[in-house]
Amino acid sequence: MVDPVHSPARQYPESYYATTIRERVPVTTLDGSISAAVCIVGGGYTGLSAALHLARRGIDAVVLEQFRIGWGASGRNGGQVHTGQRRNQYWLERHLGKSAAHAMWDVAVGARDHLDWLIQNYSIDCDLRLGLLHADHKPSYLRDTRQYIEYLQRECLVATDDYVGGYLDDRGGHLHPLNFALGIARAAHSHGAVLYEDAGAIRVTRKGSGWEVTAKGGRVLADRVVLACNGYLHGLSPEVEAHVMPINNFIAVTEPLGEDRARFLIQNGYAVSDSRFVVYYFRMTADHRLLFGGGENYSYKFPKDIGGFVHKHIRRIYPQLASVRLDFAWGGTLAITPTRMPFIREIAPGYFNSSGYSGMGVVLAPYLGRILADAIAGDRTEFELLSAIPVPRFPGGGALRTPTLIAAMSFAALRDRL
Ligand SMILES: Cc1cc2nc3c(=O)[nH]c(=O)nc-3n(C[C@H](O)[C@H](O)[C@H](O)COP(=O)(O)OP(=O)(O)OC[C@H]3O[C@@H](n4cnc5c(N)ncnc54)[C@H](O)[C@@H]3O)c2cc1C
C-alpha cells in the first residue's frame, strides 16, 4: 500500500511538526503471523485512541500503521481544537430532530473533555493553548455573530482588515498535532497495546468467526478489526469509500517572526478559523512562526509548489507578510462525508470503521476511537447513537464520485470569492 504521492515508507513529511517532535513511542515491525483480540488498521488519532482504551480494559490490541505512527492527517493538521460538531446545532436539529441534536452536542462536549483528559492524564507534551476565534469574512454572515463584533473590534484580536466579525470559543484552541498523536501512542503502549510501523494492511478477510488481516511483514488473526484509515484508505473497503471521500489541504509555516510581531498579528496566542467554505485557519507556533492553513484540492496530486500555493492565501489575510520567508510547507489528506457527519459503523460483524470527521478530527477522532473501544468491550450506547446518524453514499459511486465532488466543492469555493 505505498502511497505514490506522499512520503516514502518510514519517513514523516518534512513538516514543522516532524522537526519539533518531543514525544517518543516504542514501536516494532511485523514479522510473521500473530494473533490479537483486536487488530486496528491505521496509526492516527482514531486507531491509537481505540488501542489505548482497549488496552486500558485489558483487551489485547495491536495497531498496524503502513508508515509511521501519526504519519497521516494526525501528524500534519492545523492543530485547531474545535468544540461542537462540524454542523451547527441549527443544522443538527433540522436534520436529526431536537433530542438527537442535543445528544450530538453532549457527544461533542464529551469529546472535548476527553481531549483534556488524555493530555492531563498522560502528561502529553503538545503545547495546548486555549482560545479559538471564529472570524466572518462576509457581512452577510454576521446575523448570528453580531453580538461579538464589538468585542472583536474593541480588542483588535487579529491584525487584519479582512474580517468583519466573529466570536471567541474559549474551550477551543490549538496544539502540536504530531506530539499529541505520539502522546496517545505512548499512552496506548504503556497499557500493553503493540504498535507496528511499516506494516500496511493489504487485505481484510473473514476467517472462521474472526478476521485475518494480511499486511506487509505478516498477518494478524483477530476476533475484531477496526479500520482507522480516514483519508488514506485507498481501496481497503469499497463500502467505507462510498461514504467517505479524501480531500487534500495545505499548510505553510513562516520564518520566526519574533514575539512582539507574533503578538501583534494574533492577540493572546489564539487560533483563528474563518467562515470561508475552504477555511483559512492559522495561529502562532511556540517559537512565534505563523502556521497558516488554506487551500485544498480534490485529486491525488499535491501542487508542485505548496509554499507558493498557500502564500497567496496568507497575503490575502496579512498583506504585511507579502515578503515573509516560508520555512515549511506540506499537504495532508483528510476525509469528508456528504453530510459532514462522521461515518462510524460496524460494516460487517466484528468489523468496525470510524472516519470522515470533515476537518474536525483533532477533538472528534480520539473520542470516536474511544467509542469504538467501548462498543467492542460491550458498551454500545454512544456507538449506537452515532452509527444511527444517516451518512449517505456520495453520488456517482466509485468512478464518478470524484468529478461530482470536484464540481460541488469548486462551486462552493467560488462563492467565497464573490
Ligand atoms: C492539512 C490538514 C489540516 C487539518 N487541520 C485540522 C485542524 O486544524 N483541526 C481538526 O480538528 N482537524 C484537522 N484536520 C483533520 C484531522 O487531521 C483528521 O480528522 C484526523 O487526523 C483524522 O485522524 P485519523 O486517525 O482518523 O486519520 P489519520 O491521522 O489520517 O490516520 C490514518 C492512518 O492510517 C494509515 N493507513 C492508511 N491505510 C493503511 C493501511 N492499509 N494499513 C496500515 N495503515 C494505513 C495512514 O498511514 C495514517 O497514518 C486536518 C487535516 C489535514 C490534512
Image: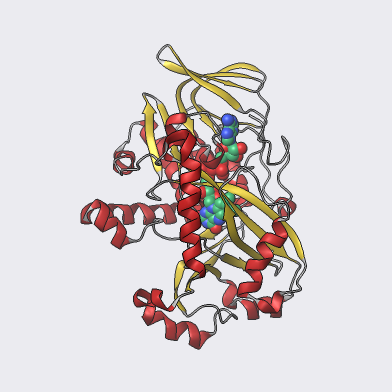
- Residue drawn at x 59%, y 80% is 160
**Is residue 121 depicted above or below 257 in this figure?**
above
| Residue 300 visible (yes or no) | yes
| Residue 189 visible (yes or no) | no
Tell which of 366 and 412 is nearer to you.
412
- Residue drawn at x 37%, y 81% is 147
- Residue drawn at x 40%, y 45% is 342
Tell which of 180 and 354 is nearer to you.
354
| Position of residue 295 in the picture relative to residue 81 (left or right) | right
Q: Quadrant of the N terminus?
A: top right
- The location of residue 351, given as percent across then percent down, is 42, 27
| Position of residue 231 in the picture relative to residue 84 (left or right) | right
| Position of residue 179 in the picture relative to residue 390 (left or right) | right
- The location of residue 341, given as percent across then percent down, is 38, 48
Tell which of 162 and 40 is nearer to you.
162
Place residue 314 in its image quadrant.
bottom right
Q: Residue furthest top?
A: 208
- The location of residue 39, given as percent across then percent down, is 51, 26
Give the quadrant of ligand 1: top right
- The location of residue 80, given as percent across then percent down, is 54, 60
